[in-house]
Amino acid sequence: MAETITKKTPLVTFPVDEMKKLIESFTPEKLASFLDVTDLKADTQEPKILKMVGWAKSLKCASVCVNPVEGTDVLPQALKGSGIKECYVIDFPLGKLDIEMKALETEHVLKKSRNVRGEGKGMIELDMVINVGRFKKDPKYALEEINAVCDAADGEEVKVIIRSSELTVKELYKVCEIFAESKAPFIKNSTGMDAYGALPEHIRIMREVVGNNRGVKAAGGISDAMTAMRLFYAGARDESLHHPDLFRIGTSSPLNILSSFGWLRHAPEDWLKAGIIPCKICPFFHNTKQRVELREEANSWCRDCMHNHYLKNKDF
């Protein structure tokens, strides 16, 4: 598939009638069940983690996602008995540890958490970052490191962060194909610290390649209900995919997503007809922080896009 990409624009579009039907199929409670409440900043401390735990428990979210250093000191005890999963990032955010070290970090996190929580398997998720540079040189290296972490995870769920903003379209298809060969159940687009976060076109490609039996997680810059619904439309449009085992949203703004969803569900047509400037949700527009070769590819897509008149004034 990566060898036969057809360049076409526009990318993902959002028909009002289909989006309205999707929005009306959700309740705030259902939407909350897909959220991984997340804070991966370097200065996050215990009080913020406990606040996130409180949000996750009251909203019944899927997990709380944090860095493992402070996280494993707090989450196992704080989430014990809640049914909410602990989610830890592995080799975050660069993915530059060698395979053995990735596996050792995974084993260490599991041991530390399980010893405290004492609830056995099934309560931990691990979001690992691939080595994007090595993938570009040797795609099979990514398969090896993904499987090594899965083996070390001892049955716990592994989500594979591919840092899609650092990939060409061809590379994005290729890494998704590699993931589909792996033992991991979930693929994730971004660390939230990349050139850009979750955009519908990348989530669409990920779902297209991995199929409906693997999970897709969208992360990075998701802070309101309409953004979340566009990502659902791109990556989990079919009702059969409306399960936290098959789709997730990583967000540091769960309260804003759910409060804005109330307004969205109250008058979906008004919100949908307001529309959005296509460039704002297109990966080829968000290229200022990318490498030269990625900017050049983005510009080639923009030149052929029916919406390129927006580029005459990029201050929007």
Image: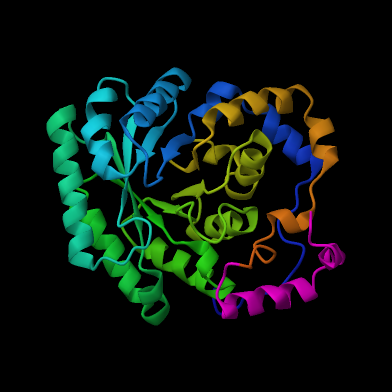
Spot occupied by residue 24 in the image (x, y as percentages of width and height): 70, 27
Q: Residue at x 65, y 39 (%)?
A: 229
Between 313 and 203, the one nearer to me in the picture: 313
The verdict on residue 283 being magenta is: no
Q: What residue do we see at 34% from left, 69% from top? A: 142
* Start-end of magenta stretch: 289-316
User: Which corner quadrant of the image does residue 157 belong to?
Assistant: top left
Tell me: residue 246, above or below residue 101: above
Residue 149, given in percent of the width and then of the height, sits at: 25, 57
Position of residue 131 measured from the top left corner of the image (x, y, whole percent): 35, 68
Q: Above or below — where is 57 with respect to 315?
A: above
Query: Where the C terminus falls, by quadrant?
Result: bottom right
Identify the image quadrant of residue 110: top left
Camera-side residue of 205 and 93: 93
Rendered position, 199 above or below 121: below
> Is residue 260 visible to us here?
yes
* Left or right position of 125 against 25: left
